[in-house]
Image: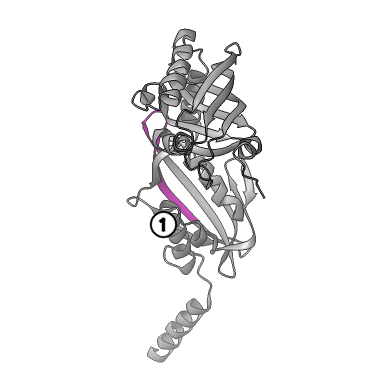
């Protein structure tokens, strides 16, 4: 009888050992998903991508993409936040093998982020599920409710389109041109541009914020001590945007773009497209002028 019971127990153990695990909370696949969550918090996109198969597909709510495009997806979203990430507490993981033999890892966690536009912190439950094959993620799905943040961003967008006071806009343009550019005095610049003011030259971003703007214009102040901007024409203001046609004159009496002073007079014409926030501060400037003409006027040719 004892031998029979021993043989029965042994057979049960052997059968149990040969059966596949259908559910667990500890596995290599779960460790991979934990690493992905950590990489997301650290913005380590290279490490995160290493866990996905080349052909892996990702679906976040209604957004479908190749998994290798996730980094750009997250980078675009990150522009909206001063900080964001998953809380380390309360995370839950499980691995299941479905009836078709497919291996899935489920994750439940809490995401928190502070919206840059409002300074408000949002807490959102998130569920991720990843299918594995040969140790790599071949399919990923993410689900959460983005409505609260979407409504907040839409409200800020609507707010930014409210017409600012025309007198304030015109006054800020005058201060920007006459005080900052013509008198080379940045003291009042913070009163007329936003903290996230962005300047573009021929559609390429060249400065963000006051310090970078000052650095961007400094070579002109150094190269042309009598640098002067004259506003020739201003368009009507439309949806907090105005076009300003201007002329710059000066004498090349300092080093500019690697060219020593020549004493030559310069004159260039240009156009600025200025956008203002709801209180009339400049938040974006798109600058256009003929750089080649300027270089030729001081005797420098561009290769």
Q: Is residue 281 visible?
A: no
State the image quarter where residue 240 is shown.
top right
Foreground residue, 88 or 288?
A: 288
Q: Is residue 193 left or right of residue 131?
A: left
Please state the horizontal and vertical placement of residue 123, each as a whole percent of the image: 38, 38
What residue did someone put label 1 on?
Answer: 38
Residue 109 appears in view: yes
- Residue sitting at 65 percent across and 33 percent down? 290
Label 1 Cα crowd, 10 Å radius (few <14 / some 14-19 / many 20+): some
Q: Does 276 sit left or right of 134 as displayed?
A: left
**Residue 31 appears at what percent x and percent y?**
44, 64
Residue 41 in magenta stretch = no
Pinpoint residue 231: horizontal percent, then vertical percent: 55, 17
Q: Quadrant of the N terminus?
A: bottom left
Residues rendered magenta in the picture: 106-122
Q: Position of 257 compared to 190: left or right? A: right
């Amino acid at each position: 009888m004892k031998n029979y019971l021993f043989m029965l127990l042994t057979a049960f153990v052997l059968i149990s050992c040969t059966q596949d695990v259908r559910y667990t909370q500890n596995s290599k696949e779960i460790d991979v998903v934990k690493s992905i969550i950590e990489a997301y918090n650290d913005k380590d996109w290279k490490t995160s991508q290493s866990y996905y198969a080349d052909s892996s597909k990702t679906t976040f709510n209604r957004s479908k993409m190749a998994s290798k495009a996730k980094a750009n997806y997250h980078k675009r979203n990150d522009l909206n936040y001063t900080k964001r990430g998953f809380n380390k507490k309360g995370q839950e993981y499980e691995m299941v093998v479905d009836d078709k033999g497919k291996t899935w890892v489920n994750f439940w966690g809490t995401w928190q982020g502070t919206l840059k536009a409002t300074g408000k912190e949002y807490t959102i439950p998130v569920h991720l599920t990843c299918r594995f094959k040969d140790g790599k993620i071949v399919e990923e799905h993410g689900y959460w409710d983005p409505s609260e943040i979407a409504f907040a961003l839409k409200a800020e967008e609507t707010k930014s389109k409210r017409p600012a006071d025309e007198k304030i806009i015109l006054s800020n343009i005058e201060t920007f041109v006459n005080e900052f550019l013509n008198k080379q005095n940045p003291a009042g610049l913070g009163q007329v541009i936003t903290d996230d003011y962005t300047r573009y030259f021929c559609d390429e971003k060249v400065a963000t914020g006051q310090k970078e703007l000052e650095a961007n214009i400094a070579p002109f102040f150094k190269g042309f001590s009598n640098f002067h901007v004259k506003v020739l024409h201003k368009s009507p203001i439309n949806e907090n945007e105005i076009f300003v046609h201007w002329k710059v004159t000066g004498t090349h009496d300092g080093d500019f773009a690697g060219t020593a002073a020549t004493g030559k007079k310069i004159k260039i014409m240009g156009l600025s497209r200025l956008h203002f926030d709801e209180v009339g501060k400049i938040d974006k400037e798109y600058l256009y002028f003929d750089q080649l003409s300027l270089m030729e006027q001081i005797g420098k040719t561009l290769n």
